[in-house]
Image (spheres, rainbow, N blue to C red):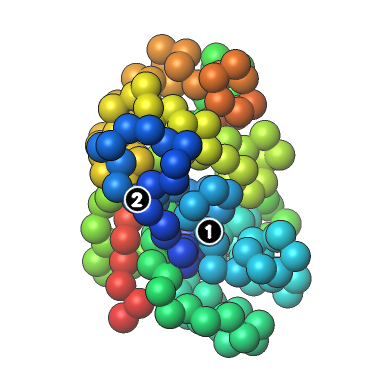
């Protein structure tokens, strides 16, 4: 798994469009829907105009998030801090291929000393930059596929199997490529 960074989120309870009672809340990687990025009020761009994000479009450390929030007068009260890692390969048109961060943007993710694995999300990145959607929540795929209480796959193997079986495609979710991300909660420490 490749460290891609941190994001503070405003997590909500399961929305009405997800019908499965198994899902209690949504810890999706994408900022759309109900797991809003802390700075989504900056003109719809979940990253400030000062380009403090890294080449994966996340933040290298919690301190950078705090600095952006302070500079932009954004309250972090009520947010949860997540740390993400992604598989080294993404699925694009039925083929698994390597990818990396945007090379023009520095990326130096500080791996947390402690992290609590919450599950695995499948995300879309058709723009090859920022994560766009999490089909388990955005497209209600959790109604058809087994997920945990946070609307995530319980294991990396489950996420890979569902991708390899063709269950994520333009007809059922969003256009790919698709990446598998671990979702880890971390403390603000």
Report whether residue 180 is seen.
no
Real-space Cα separation, disc 2 to disc 1, in angstroms: 12 Å
Which numbered dot is residue 36?
1
Circle 2 Cα neighbour tier, 10 Å, few/some/many (<14 / 14–19 / ≥20)? some
Number of labels in the image equals 2
User: Which disc, if any, is residue 116?
Assistant: none
Q: In which quarter of the image is residue 180?
A: top left
Which residue corresponds to the image point at 75% horizontal and 65% vertical from the top-left?
43
Query: In which quadrant will I find the N terminus?
Result: top left
Q: What secondary structure is marked by label 2?
A: loop
Labelled disc at residue 25? 2
- Determine which quarter of the picture holds residue 18: top left
Residue 178 seen in this snapshot? yes
Which one is nearer the viewer's eye here, 151 or 94? 151
Where does residue 64 sit, x and y in percent of width and height? 54, 77
Q: Dots 2 and 1: beta carbons under 8 Å?
A: no
Query: In the image, residue 129 lies at what x, y percent?
Result: 66, 46
Q: Is residue 87 above or below residue 58?
A: above
Please give the name of the residue rendered at 73% of the width and 74% of the height, measured from the top-left corner: 50
Determine the image quadrant of residue 41. Answer: bottom right
- For the C terminus, the image quarter is bottom left
């Amino acid at each position: 798994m490749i460290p891609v960074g941190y994001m503070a989120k405003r997590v909500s309870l399961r929305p009405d469009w997800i019908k499965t009672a198994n899902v209690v809340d949504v810890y999706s990687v994408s900022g759309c829907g109900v797991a809003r990025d802390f700075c989504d009020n900056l003109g719809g761009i979940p990253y400030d105009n000062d380009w403090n994000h890294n080449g994966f479009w996340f933040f290298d450390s919690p301190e950078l998030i705090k600095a952006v929030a302070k500079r932009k007068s954004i309250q972090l009260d009520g947010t949860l801090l997540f740390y993400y890692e992604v598989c080294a390969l993404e699925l694009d048109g039925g083929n698994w291929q390597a990818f990396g961060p945007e090379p023009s943007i520095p990326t130096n993710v500080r791996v947390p000393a402690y992290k609590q694995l919450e599950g695995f999300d499948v995300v879309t990145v058709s723009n090859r930059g920022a994560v766009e959607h999490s089909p388990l929540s955005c497209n209600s795929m959790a109604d058809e596929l087994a997920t945990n209480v946070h609307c995530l796959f319980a294991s990396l193997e489950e996420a890979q199997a569902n991708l390899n079986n063709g269950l994520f495609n333009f007809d059922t979710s969003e256009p790919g490529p698709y990446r598998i991300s671990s979702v880890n909660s971390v403390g603000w420490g």
